[in-house]
Image (tube, rainbow, N blue to C red):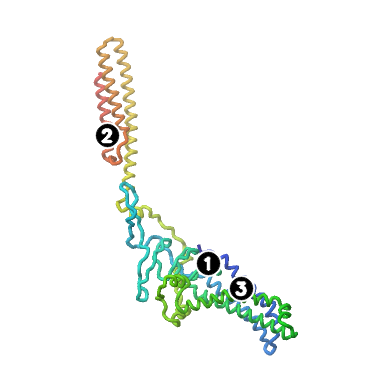
Amino acid sequence: MQKFFLGGRLIFGPDARSLPVTLLLISVPSIIFCIFVARHLRHRFSPYNAGYAIMVVAVVFTIYVLIILFLTSARDPGIIPRNSRPPEEEPHHDSSVPAQAGSRHTPGRQFPRTKEVMVNGMLVRVKYCSTCMLYRPPRCSHCSICNNCVERFDHHCPWVGQCIGLRNYRFFFMFVSSTTLLCIYVFSMSALYIKVLMDDNHRTVWEAMKESPPSVVLMAYCFIALWFVGGLTGFHLYLIGTNQTTYENFRHRADNRINIFDRGCPSNFDEIFCTKLNPSKNNFRALVQEEVPRHNEEAKAEDVGGDTHPKIEVDLENRQNLLKISEQHNIEEGIDLSKISQRQNDEENDSRESNDPLRSTLEADSIMGINHRASVTMTMIRSDPEPSSYGNSSSEIAADSHTNSRVTIKESGRLFE
């Protein structure tokens, strides 16, 4: 992710640690040049002290290159703001994922991978970015390093630690071309100093090079650097002239596509260097607002056959109510059974005293009937009903079972009276 400084005024790429290396590769050779080469050339052009201009040009040129590098690296390259939700378009349901009966799995909800837009009178296919949840504008691509969609994406440059896009491509080209000119300047002045040493003492090239080793090192360094920055400058001159990006050049060359953005060399250069840059689409200094979770709404939108959560919650609530009723009924029944058992003991004592075998038989039969009815009632209440029978039917079962137990107790009371 990007790194922000000064309250969001400066934005760097995720690999901004490579930026100090680039600074050293530019500033250190320039310092060596000013100390060991330009300092000795101050008095070589005596009429107007033109030798001082050599050092001034080197210092100013180096500062200019570093400023352009800073503008390239610390600038929004054209990041497109991400969407917090998918675009408001009709989603495509993948029929290859069938919905199973009785389950919450629904067909795959996907957005079309591409759609066509009109650009310069021709249809251009743009892709959907699942990370940023948007359809990328033409010439936009998602950078895998910065993890952002960038307008007119050219490439990600590790030397500046930033993506190169619509809002910093101009500065990137100025940086590369200026570095090329600086290398040429340092190489030329170092070679001039070698020539001055040869003319003063009538020395050979090898003797002059031994007298000024820093000049030799600078010439070798600039010669190697020119192969990179010089070649890069020439390549981007070609890209600007044909109105291409680095990404498009490699992709179109592989696919043999026609460049519909080419408007002619003069117009292409005018587009890059003379067009006013639009302000950034992001306010990096604004406070981040937390999004309210919308899990319930998204679940409703994704379920084609309707959401089953409310029904499950009602079933669970009915189950809990039924268990409470059964527990309360068991407590009341336990109290009534204890009273019946106490009365039974009293009647048994009376029967023993009276020694009436017929009455004892009738009382035993009545007690067995009471126990049988109570066990049946307990079994009906404790049974686990089906989820589809919850609701009003479950309450009616509990009420009927409670009424039956009351009738049983009353009937038993009549038997003992």
Q: Residue at horizontal 33%, vertical 39%?
A: 319
Q: Position of residue 408 (x, y in %)?
A: 26, 25
| Image quarter of residue 276 | bottom left
Q: Secondary structure at mark 1?
A: strand
The vertical placement of 207 against 111, above or below, is below
Three-letter residue code for mark 3 = Ile
At 56% from the left and 75% from the top, the residue drawn is 229
Q: Which residue is mark 1?
A: 12
Check disc 2 and give the amino acid type.
Ala
Q: Quadrant of residue 206?
A: bottom right
Q: Which residue is mark 3?
A: 26
Instruction: Answer with left or right where residue 355 lies relative to residue 79.
Output: left
Q: Which residue is mark 2?
A: 399
Tag on residue 358?
none
- Looking at the rendered structure, the secondary structure element under dot 3 is helix
- Please state the horizontal and vertical placement of residue 100, each as a whole percent of the image: 32, 49
